Amino acid sequence: AQKVTQAQTEISVVEKEDVTLDCVYETRDTTYYLFWYKQPPSGELVFLIRRNSFDEQNEISGRYSWNFQKSTSSFNFTITASQVVDSAVYFCALSERDSSYKLIFGSGTRLLVRP
Amino acid sequence: GAGVSQSPSNKVTEKGKDVELRCDPISGHTALYWYRQSLGQGLEFLIYFQGNSAPDKSGLPSDRFSAERTGGSVSTLTIQRTQQEDSAVYLCASSLLERGPNEKLFFGSGTQLSVL
């Protein structure tokens, strides 16, 4: 069965620290997609990245970077030089080929960046 | 509007009453999704609409829940005979489907439903 685990419930860091949010997934499908979404206090989930199962290249976008490792079924997210505006709940999600429109979300990690 | 719009933003109702939640997707988006976010269950898929195809209702938790999408645009999620366990944030999302259903989703701010 498919599952996404975000073991870190809450993380608190001081501004400018680097922080890594962990995501471990389970799926039997060989074709799948992984996502990260950010949910700020306003409530709207904001798309950050989509990665397909055939592309293991790591990605960097500004202060954000993602490390996809199929060998450990992980898709971790690192924020470099964190800022107060990064404070939010971050969700990792999985979709599989046969039901590709359904996102299976992890429970989320609440990140608090203190000034 | 520029984004996905949901109304009302907050709804308080008494147990046993029916409620209707509305979603206006981004203009031109052919796919529409409903998710539910609750403390106990996290984010759960409820239903998916794509164009004129039959919707995937497999995530609806009971037959008290129904949804429709009129004219390929606005969607209404209806909960009949509400129960306290229906209390949650109901999130709507839409997407373009240019490259398949796992395109990035644009979410609304949700409707916070409280059943007393």
Image (spheres, grey):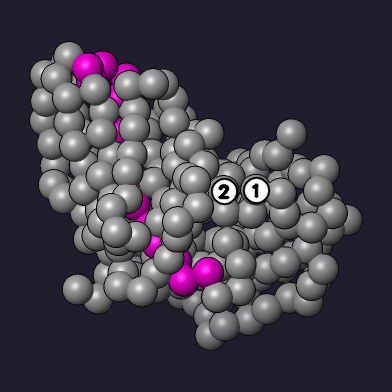
Image disc number at residue A51: none
Toward which corner of the image does residue A71 lie, by quadrant? bottom right
Toward which corner of the image does residue B17 lie, by quadrant? top left
At mark 1, the secondary structure is: helix
Q: Residue B39: tell me if it is visible.
A: yes
The residue identified by callout 1 is A99
Residue B64 left/right relative to B45: left
Q: Residue pushed farthest right?
A: A71
Crowding near pointer 2: few (<14 within 10 Å), some, many (20+)?
A: many
* Chain identity of mark 1: A
Q: Is residue A85 above or below residue B113?
A: below
The answer to which of B19 and A4 lies nearer the viewer is B19
The answer to which of B105 and B100 lies nearer the viewer is B100
- What segment is highlighted magenta in the picture? B81-97
Q: Is residue B2 above or below residue B53?
A: below
Residue B73, image x, y percentages: 30, 61
Indicate the amino acid at tag 2: Lys
Residue A34 left/right relative to A68: left
Measure how far apart labels 1 and 2 are at the Cα level.
6 Å
Crowding near pointer 1: few (<14 within 10 Å), some, many (20+)?
A: few
Image disc number at residue A102: 2
Q: Residue A9: tell me if it is visible.
A: no
Q: Is residue A22 above or below residue A57?
A: above
